[in-house]
């Protein structure tokens, strides 16, 4: 069946071509546009539409690098369906080099607490509304990339939705196809893109990886693994030829898993603590020191689990989170 041109905002990609453009959100006081950049890769045969975005949080640069690299690598003349890439969703937070929208007195300025957005809301709610309705709603599977931003590091892990219905089954299937070992079930909050997409029947997974370590070779490795994950999903869906590269097993974890500091001070990790590895109930993970080097608080694992988040910024305020420990749910062996 002949494919049609894909049009989003000013981007128009005929079958077998790529295109870039922008979706308009609003204008700044000086009249310049606030927009969402889009990159379309339109295949030559019909197939699913998959989306991938970055910089929902403005200081998480793994997403833009992965989207740009994925779009550059795809050959639309050898592809079914379409890929819609959004390198930067919250352009205002991105330019301000921070997590949230810099000026938004009307809505909570974290974009990922504003979905599905409001056309008549504050600026962040309007960005969410435009992104969700003009872009995400056009897809069947959406990949939204996050990281540890400017204060934390995350091992490669992926948030998916687990439930007993068709959507839960598809979400686990796509999460496994991405090819990362650590799967965090239902690790989302009210107002996230994941939740709003799922209520529309769109499978939405959130790979989270990296953060404060921005050495070039490590960035390149993370980009490679994110792009491999996306092409794995596209192979699984029949959009690209070939088989996904899958791990020997997947480890499913769950839980509102942050451990918070009661005291401010300087954070020091124990030598045997390692991100992405298991911790045992009662294991001392870190110490909080006062200005004179005295230990004023011990951070201890409350249960057996997997270290899925780690604050790397040594300064810590009371109430900040130190680490995230995912509770073990089950291991899924890859029998293929
Ligand atoms: Zn994020």
Image (tube, rainbow, N blue to C red):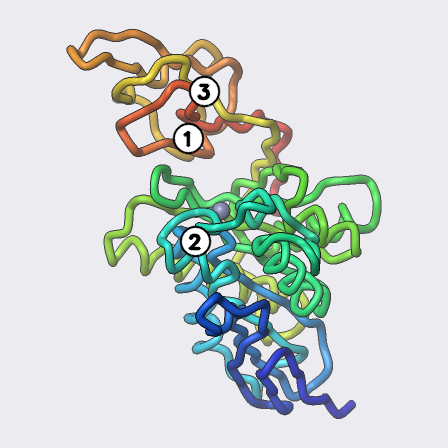
| Marks 2/1: CA–CA distance | 28 Å
Q: Secondary structure at mark 2?
A: loop
- Residue 247: in sight, yes or no? no
From the image, tell me which residue sits under label 3.
260
User: Is 275 displayed left or right of 205 in the figure?
Assistant: left
Mark drawn on residue 277: 1
Q: Which quadrant holds the N terminus?
A: bottom right
- Where does the image place residue 133, in percent across and percent down from the top left? 71, 64
| Marks 3/1: CA–CA distance | 19 Å
- Residue 265: in sight, yes or no? yes
Q: Earlier in the sequence, mark 2 or mark 1?
A: 2
Q: Residues within 10 Å of mark 3 (few under 14, many from 20)?
A: some
- Which is more toward the observer, 296 or 91? 91
| Marks 2/3: CA–CA distance | 24 Å
Between circles 2 and 3, the one closer to the viewer is 2
From the image, tell me which residue sits under label 2.
58
Between circles 3 and 1, the one closer to the viewer is 3
Between circles 2 and 1, the one closer to the viewer is 2
Say whether marks 3 and 1 touch (CB < 8 Å): no
User: Is 200 displayed left or right of 111 in the figure?
Assistant: right
Q: Earlier in the sequence, mark 3 or mark 1?
A: 3
Above/below status of 325 relative to 184: above
Please name the residue shown 49% across and 66% down the image: 28
């Amino acid at each position: 069946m002949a494919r049609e041109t894909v049009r989003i905002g000013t981007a128009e990609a005929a079958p077998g071509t790529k295109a870039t453009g922008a979706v308009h959100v609003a204008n700044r006081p000086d009249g310049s546009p606030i927009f969402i950049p889009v990159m379309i890769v339109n295949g030559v045969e019909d197939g699913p539409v998959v989306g991938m975005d970055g910089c929902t949080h403005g200081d998480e640069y793994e997403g833009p690098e992965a989207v740009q690299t994925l779009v550059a690598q795809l050959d639309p003349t050898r592809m079914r369906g379409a890929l819609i890439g959004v390198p930067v969703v919250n352009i205002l937070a991105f330019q301000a080099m921070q997590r949230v929208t810099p000026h938004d007195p009307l809505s909570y300025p974290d974009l990922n607490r504003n979905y599905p957005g409001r056309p008549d809301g504050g600026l962040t709610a309007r960005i969410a509304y435009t992104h969700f309705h003009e872009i995400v709603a056009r897809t069947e599977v959406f990949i939204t990339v996050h990281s540890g931003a400017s204060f934390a590091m995350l091992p490669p892990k992926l948030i998916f939705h687990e439930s007993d219905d068709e959507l839960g089954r598809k979400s686990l299937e796509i999460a496994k196809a991405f090819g990362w070992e650590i799967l965090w079930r239902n690790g989302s909050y009210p107002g996230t893109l994941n939740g709003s997409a799922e209520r529309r029947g769109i499978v939405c997974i959130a790979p989270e990886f990296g953060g404060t370590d921005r050495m070039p070779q490590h960035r390149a490795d993370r980009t490679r693994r994110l792009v491999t994950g996306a092409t794995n999903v596209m192979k699984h869906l029949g959009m690209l030829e070939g088989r996904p590269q899958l791990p020997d097993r997947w480890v499913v974890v769950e839980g509102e898993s942050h451990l918070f500091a009661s005291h401010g001070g300087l954070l020091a990790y124990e030598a045997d603590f390692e991100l992405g590895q298991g911790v045992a109930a009662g294991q001392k993970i870190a110490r909080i020191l006062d200005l004179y080097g005295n230990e004023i608080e011990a951070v201890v694992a409350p249960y057996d689990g997997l270290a899925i988040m780690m604050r790397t910024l040594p300064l810590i305020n009371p109430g900040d989170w130190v680490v995230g420990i995912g509770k073990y749910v089950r291991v899924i062996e890859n029998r293929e």
